């Protein structure tokens, strides 16, 4: 059996979120900022959780090893003889939450400092890793592995996104009226 994020589910999620966004009093430009954010969230869900393959027991792949030792998988990746593995694995994990680091502080005024952004980054990355771990245990076969190094790299990427936003605030303020960005440009 294959569980996938189908377009119908994506449409329901997008319409629900957009209904919430349009219900609030926002300018058309502020509302427009939410569209790429939603597209990114759909990609993030698809990349981190779907598809979920549930195989009959005779074809199931045994659960692999999780990594709770910091930098163990990073060192193993750099030791790989396959060209491009390090770039794909490490670069992919750095890029995974980078857009989220940018968008969260842009769209929500309460995440207006590096410390708050850091906490959100840790929370989101930990949520993803823990949910992947739980889903693996629930289906009883190799699905995704918990990897502490993914957590580190995801949070680093999230913070890069936050700092890109911080550097971009002067330009963004000229294009879009977002009150809470005034505090970030200090």
Image (cartoon, rainbow, N blue to C red):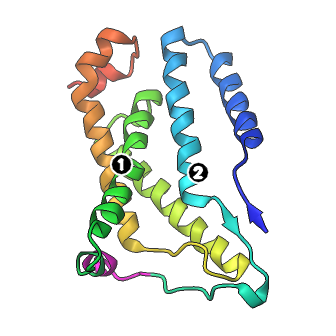
100 up-or-down from 135: above or below = above
* Mark 1 lies on residue: 158
Q: Residue at x 72, y 77 (%)?
A: 139
Q: Secondary structure at mark 2?
A: helix
Nearer-the-camera pick, 10 or 159:
10
Residue 34 coordinates in the image, percent (x, y): 53, 26
Q: Secondary structure at mark 1?
A: helix
Q: Residues within 10 Å of mark 2 (few under 14, many from 20)?
A: some
Residue 132 coordinates in the image, percent (x, y): 58, 68
115 up-or-down from 151: above or below = above
Counting residues from the start of the chain, the first of labels 2 and 1 encountered is: 2
Q: Nearer the viewer, mark 2 or mark 1?
A: 2
Residue 68 on the magenta segment: yes
Residue 43's disc is none
Q: Is residue 42 in sight in this rendering?
A: yes
Q: How many badges with numbers are in the image?
A: 2
* Mark 2 lies on residue: 45
Nearer-the-camera pick, 99 or 84:
84
Q: Residue at x 66, y 25 (%)?
A: 18
Q: Residue at x 23, y 24 (%)?
A: 185
Q: Is residue 27 in sight in this rendering?
A: no
Nearer-the-camera pick, 157 or 184:
157
Quarter of the view holding residue 182: top left
Residue 14 coordinates in the image, percent (x, y): 67, 32
Residue 176 on the magenta segment: no
Magenta-colored span: 67-75
């Amino acid at each position: 059996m294959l569980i996938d994020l189908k377009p119908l589910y994506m449409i329901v999620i997008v319409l629900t979120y957009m209904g919430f966004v349009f219900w609030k009093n926002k300018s058309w430009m502020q509302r427009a900022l939410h569209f790429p954010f939603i597209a990114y969230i759909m990609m993030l869900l698809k990349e981190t959780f779907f598809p979920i393959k549930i195989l009959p027991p005779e074809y199931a792949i045994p659960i692999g090893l999780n990594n709770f030792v910091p930098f163990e998988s990073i060192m193993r990746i750099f030791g790989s003889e396959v060209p491009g593995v390090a770039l794909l694995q490490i670069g992919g994990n750095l890029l995974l939450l980078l857009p989220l680091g940018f968008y969260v502080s842009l769209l929500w005024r309460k995440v207006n400092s590096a410390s708050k952004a850091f906490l959100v980054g840790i929370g989101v990355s930990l949520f993803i890793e823990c949910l992947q771990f739980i889903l693996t245990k629930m289906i009883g076969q190799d699905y995704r592995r918990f990897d502490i190094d993914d957590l580190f790299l995801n949070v680093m990427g999230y913070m890069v996104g936050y700092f890109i936003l911080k550097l971009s605030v002067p330009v963004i303020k000229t294009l879009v009226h977002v009150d809470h960005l005034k505090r970030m440009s200090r």
